[in-house]
Image: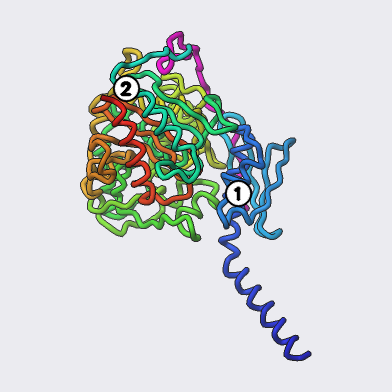
Amino acid sequence: MKIIKFVCIGLLCVVIAIVAFNISKLKLISGFAAKNMASCYFLAKQDPTLTENEDNSSFLISLAKTEIDELNKTVTASVFGMSKSKAVYRQGVGVALVSDDKKKLHNNQPNRKQKHINLPYPYGHLAAIDTVFSNINYSELDSVVTNSFVENHPDGIKNTRSILVLYKGKIIAEKYAAGFSKNSLLQGWSITKTLLSTSFGVLEQSGYDIYQPITAFPEWTSKEQQQLNTNHFLQMESGMKWEENYGKVCDVTKMLFKDSDCTQRAIKQPLVATPGTTFYYQSGNSNVLSALLRKQFKTHQEYLDFPYKTYIDKIGMHSMILETDVVGNYVASSYSWATTRDWAKFGQLFLQKGCWNNEQILSPKWVDYVTTPSPNSKGEYGGQWWLNTGGYMPNVPRDCYYADGYQGQRIFVIPSKELVIVRFGVTELGRVGFYPLFDKMVSQICATIH
């Protein structure tokens, strides 16, 4: 009996040690589960069972139990009854995790002028014109798109929710998984980086200089920090110390699932390399840009309004929601929602060199800038856009560039083919793992146009 008792005590000690060691990770799990469930439920109006089975289905996240409070617009999540996290929905700015420091939750909303645009999609809100092009093999195109919705198909991608293809500004293919439609809001994840950074393209037209040293942050006192400019952050070449690993407790997961202010952790990071000498993709860079954007305005309201006023609502992306943190910063690294059709409009704006309904919303030079490889990315990254200049998708045209989000969210822009291809889903693969799959899908779509 004594041996059994000692064994039981020993096992209990091991369990306690494991739990203690992973308690901080449990908080990240509950934070992700609460935030994602709240956004999917209150923003996207998605069935909670679907969210549990797909959006929150990875092994670790599935350990969390979520509870929806319809009255207070909150979701609470815990893991084995421990490490509770609460996410709160606010009209117009989405969901924020309420952390332990009891900071006041902001509820300001952007002022939006959502005028009906009396033109066919994508340039307005009328029905898309049914156009047939003689140089497109529609049966092949339909096959490529359909295969991406067939689970375990050798040419497909698991858990696809939507695909839309625009050619010369006309829809030539559009398909949705069961339970989704052209009206469904889908999460952009890191596409938010590309979306919000476009604000600096708008500012640039008014004289903003992305190469001018940033003076907005008094925390930056070292000689090298005072050399930092907007270009360094747009190109992911700030040299900032940062760990981007979603499988552990580190800078990026603390920022998203612990911090009330998603910008301060990155702003306070030291440099480990001279700005402009190394490429390292990090979400902290994008949230520094969010803080920098806020510094351009006298009031918080002007900051909230700016992206919608200057390009989002102007091109009719009325479904778009940019989510903010507790203190009212846009979480530029990660959180935005829109319909597939509205995501495609964003791609079309760049395909058209920033021109929309005869208005130059962005300078063509800005589009050239963001699609030019950053000096140290080996042709893989531009200005918050990913590039195929380095041939990472060898069968896809080299001029292809794309906005990239977690779980395979993509907006591909291919100027040489006059194409915008949008794909959304919930596929658990790393960025490099997606290369062969999207190489096949995008190249096959391109091949249907003769």
In the foreground, 196 or 294: 196
Q: Which residue is mark 1?
A: 33
Q: Residue at horizontal 54%, vertical 31%? A: 185
Q: Residue at horizontal 47%, vertical 26%? A: 305
89 displayed left or right of 370: right
Q: Is residue 294 above or below residue 205?
A: below
**Neighbour tally class for label 2: few under 14, some 14-19, many 20 plus, Cα within 10 Å:** some
- Whether residue 206 is visible here, answered yes or no, is no
186 displayed left or right of 10: left
Q: Position of residue 101 (x, y in %)?
A: 61, 52
Considering every residue shown, the one lying at the far left of the view is 375
Q: Position of residue 287 (x, y in %)?
A: 42, 43
| Whole-number angstrom distance, CA of label 1 to CA of label 2 | 43 Å
Q: Which residue is mark 2?
A: 136
Q: Residue at horizontal 43%, vertical 16%? A: 121
Query: Which portion, as a residue range, is magenta?
Result: 100-125
Q: Is residue 154 above or below residue 356?
A: below
